[in-house]
Image: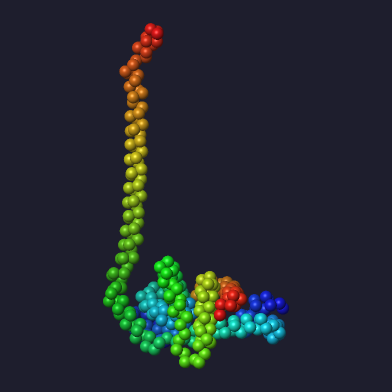
């Protein structure tokens, strides 16, 4: 086995989850290879902290502290009455604001279109009125005159 | 008191049932939280939050899973939410330049009474390195690894907690170990310690 293969199996070797044959191969390599032996020792020292953290214990009288915290919570936010409605009202209010915002935006957009249509109509009107101010007969007679 | 009695008592709001539940499971929940957050004070706060959640939502417990499965699920969720919130705070602190001071304080060597302070410092660095390596794992791998290594739960029990298959749990734990090993080796090569 080369060093790279050994490195990939070291964690499993240290926790004892390799098969017998593989474990023997890793062991015989570590005995011969100083680099892998050093890394194995380092890895062993590092993962030993898992066992130490595992043994950490809760401080005594945990239930007393828990009960005190529970009582404070009950006093500041007495259960259902103040807790549930807030959770329903907040999203409902935001949804309402969103709907109002979208509706206002659509309304503003539509009124903008109406103004544009009115302006276009006003621009068209002079062209139409020119027909009245100068009837075609007058125009043609002027042409004949020229 | 068996599980059925505890659940019945919790639903009725009986303090004796709640107390029995807390005293029976407090250490297990604490160990789970400790495995994820790596700080005893935070782990205790989270353990309290888990039992407060149990107290509040006991009436909604449907008994379609074991009580312990439910407790572990709440513990994992609370711990992960805590870590996510912590990550956001650290990001904000990094903007304000407060992170360096906080990290520096973590490397303080405790009054262990050892005559080899360098050894103590090395150990402290190894501990931080392990925590960072674990923290760098994807969430699902991290949770599966913690439940297996810290809580000594079987693959079957972990599969029930994570609501997945045993094969999936095996794969998660295998990949977690591989990734952990790789991170630690990368650090070893760079001579982090």
Where in the figure is residue B144, as x and y percent of width and height?
53, 75
The image quarter in which residue A97 lies? bottom left
Where in the figure is residue B124, as x and y percent of width and height?
50, 83
Judging depth in this view, the residue of A15 and A103 nearest the camera is A15
Vertical comparison of A134 with B90: above or below: above
Say which quadrant the N terminus of chain B sits in.
bottom left
Tell me if I can see residue B5 in this picture: no
Tell me if I can see residue A108 in this picture: yes
Q: Which residue occupies 33% across, 29% down?
A: A122
Colour pattern: rainbow
Q: Which residue occupies 34% across, 86% down?
A: A64
The image quarter in which residue B186 lies? bottom right
Residue furthest top in the image: A145
Judging depth in this view, the residue of B34 and B105 nearest the camera is B105
Q: Which residue occupies 40% across, 87% down?
A: A59
- Count of numbered tags: 0
Where in the figure is residue B60, as x and y percent of width and height?
39, 73
Vertical comparison of A102 with B125: above or below: above
Where in the figure is residue B18, as x and y percent of width and height?
37, 83
Q: Which residue occupies 36% across, 43% down?
A: A109
Judging depth in this view, the residue of B115 and B51 nearest the camera is B115
Say which quadrant the C terminus of chain B sits in.
bottom right
């Amino acid at each position: 086995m080369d060093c790279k293969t050994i490195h990939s199996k070291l964690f499993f070797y240290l926790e004892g989850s390799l098969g017998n044959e593989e474990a023997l191969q890793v062991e015989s390599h570590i005995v011969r290879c100083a680099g892998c032996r050093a890394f194995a020792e380092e890895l062993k020292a590092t993962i030993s902290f898992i066992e130490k953290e595992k043994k950490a214990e809760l401080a005594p009288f945990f239930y007393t502290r828990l009960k005190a915290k529970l009582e404070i919570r009950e006093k500041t936010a007495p259960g259902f009455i103040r807790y549930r409605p807030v959770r329903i009202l907040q999203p409902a209010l935001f949804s309402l604001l969103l709907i109002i915002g979208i509706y206002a935006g659509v309304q503003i957009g539509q009124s903008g279109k109406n103004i544009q249509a009115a302006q276009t109509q006003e621009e068209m009107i002079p062209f139409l009125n020119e027909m009245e101010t100068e009837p075609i007969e007058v125009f043609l007679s002027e042409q004949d005159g020229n | 008191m068996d599980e059925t009695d505890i659940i019945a008592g919790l639903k009725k709001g009986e303090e004796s049932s709640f107390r029995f539940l807390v005293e029976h499971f407090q250490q297990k929940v604490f160990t789970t939280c400790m495995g994820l957050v790596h700080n005893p004070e935070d782990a205790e706060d989270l353990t309290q939050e888990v039992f407060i959640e149990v107290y509040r939502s006991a009436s909604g417990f449907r008994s379609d899973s074991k009580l312990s499965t439910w407790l572990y699920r709440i513990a994992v969720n609370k711990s992960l939410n805590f870590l996510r919130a912590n990550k956001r705070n650290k990001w904000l602190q990094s903007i304000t330049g407060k992170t360096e001071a906080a990290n520096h304080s973590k490397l303080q060597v405790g009054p262990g009474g050892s005559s080899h302070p360098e050894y103590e410092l090395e150990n402290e660095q190894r501990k931080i390195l392990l925590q960072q390596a674990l923290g760098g794992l994807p969430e699902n791998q991290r949770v599966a690894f913690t439940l297996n290594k810290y809580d000594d739960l079987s693959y079957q029990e972990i599969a029930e907690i994570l609501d997945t298959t045993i094969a999936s749990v095996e794969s998660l734990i295998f990949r977690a170990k591989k990734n952990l090993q790789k991170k630690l080796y990368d650090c070893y090569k760079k001579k982090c310690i």
